[in-house]
Image (spheres, grey):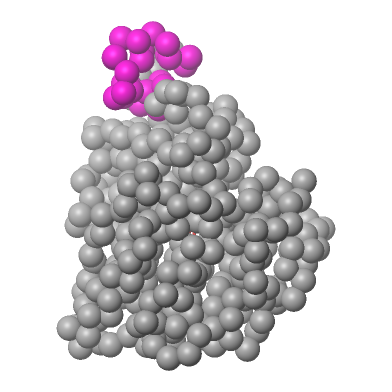
Amino acid sequence: MSAGTGGLPVTLLTGFLGAGKTTFLNRLLADPALGETGVIVNEFGDVPLDGTLIETATGGAVLEMAGGCLCCMDGGVLDETLADLTEAAKKRGRPLSRIVIETSGMADPMPILGEIGASGRVRLNGVLTVVDCLHGKTTLADFDEARRQVAAADRIVLSKAELADADSVSRLRRALGDLAPRTEILDTGEEPTMLLGDLSSFSGESEVSDSVPHASPTDGDRIHHAPAEHAHHRHHHHHHGTAYATTVVRADRPLAPRALSGFVEVLVGTLGSRLLRVKGLARLKGETRPFVVQAVQGMVHPPYALDRWPDDAPEETALVVITHGHRDGEVEALFGAFTGEVATDRPDAAALSDNPLAIPGFSSF
Ligand SMILES: Nc1nc2c(ncn2[C@@H]2O[C@H](COP(=O)(O)OP(=O)(O)OP(=O)(O)O)[C@@H](O)[C@H]2O)c(=O)[nH]1
């Protein structure tokens, strides 16, 4: 994407579900050389976690948009958000020197780039696309959104290289080279200024057409914007309504760690390639701190504790599960089997008797 002139520079940070966008962004934001950076985070699913994780890591100004998808929103929503973020920073006496927009993992970058281009107040610095070395190759083969994210990149940043073997990283690099032959591929370990600096000197695939190749703040301001309804979905290249399903499972009682880990492991095993993402906070027995729970496709990442519960989050377990292809109630049924929580969208008796894992006594965790 070629950069515009004038206005505050905006970098679009994209990449498929769980690729490592937030982790990478936290690393970048920790570098004082980057100056005051405003962040707009867009998550799919109504448990906003990325904003909390970024605030926790940086204490910076974060403006969060949760529960919708930026590329499906009405025109003008992003522009208003950019204005609010800039104003809030000015009021704090810390004017911004750049803005990063982290898209949701299923976002098509093109409509968002259109919105940035239409905004008179900012200029596009470029598009950074994070690609996960563990899952990138299959994700690129299976999901149009992932290919469009790569095709739009000015720079591609590889994450999780240390978890993958050298051969699969080379194969991934070749696949990326086919999709975006002129785009530089870097590692998340590069110098932050190199990664987030002026991207305009690197020309990626500056035109993304419809013919994308088919492969087989502690003191920060946080403003919540209500997402537009998906009914306003414009015609572009993804179909959240049908292809992806987002389920939120909740429990207000503290959970036994074994029940939680059992749920996540069996979910991964049962859903197989249909499972794309699990993330959220858990309230565990004997713990006052919340635990961050994360899985990306078949990989369960180690949970860790935050120092405290976010101010705006209830002290309860709330996990977002994103699947590709949906069977009604299956995620809720598994959660119920491990935690003793009944599915909320079905009559309790049915939820329990249909439960494939209802082992007597097990739900007493
Ligand atoms: N080992 C390792 N783990 C990583 C790396 N990058 C991300 N992760 C882990 O991968 C999981 C997902 O990372 P996130 O940064 O939340 O990914 P994301 O792209 O922001 O996720 P979504 O916003 O849900 O699409 C987390 O458990 C991270 O700790 C990496 O380079 N190495």
Q: In which quarter of the image is the N terminus?
A: bottom right
User: On the picture, is 273 further left or further right than 277?
Assistant: right
- Towards the viewer: 228 or 200: 228
Q: Specify whether residue 344 is painted magenta.
A: yes
Q: In which quarter of the image is the C terminus?
A: top left
Decide: is 224 above or below 255.
below
- Give x and y (percent) for residue 125: 51, 82
Report how many numbered discs are placed on residues in the image. 0
| Vertical comparison of 348 with 7: above or below | above
**In the depicted structure, whether residue 183 falls above or below residue 298:** below
Q: Where is residue 181 in the image (x, y as percent from the top left)?
A: 77, 71
Return the residue nearer the eye: 100 or 118. Answer: 118
Residue drawn at point x = 48 percent, y = 43 percent: 240
Q: In which quarter of the image is residue 231?
A: top left
Q: Is residue 24 left or right of residue 189?
A: left
- The residue drawn where x is 28% and y is 33% is 251
Q: Where is residue 294 in the image (x, y as percent from the top left)?
A: 47, 48
Q: Magenta stretch?
A: 333-358
Image-based side of 282 in relation to 152, left or right: left
Question: Could you say which is closer to the camera, residue 358 or residue 199?
Answer: 199
Q: Nearer the viewer, residue 93 or 179?
A: 179
Residue 211, magenta (yes or no): no
Quarter location, residue 158: bottom right
In the image, residue 119 sits, relative to residue 164, either above or below, namely: below
Q: Can residue 3 be seen in this view?
A: yes
Q: Which residue is outermost to the front?
A: 235
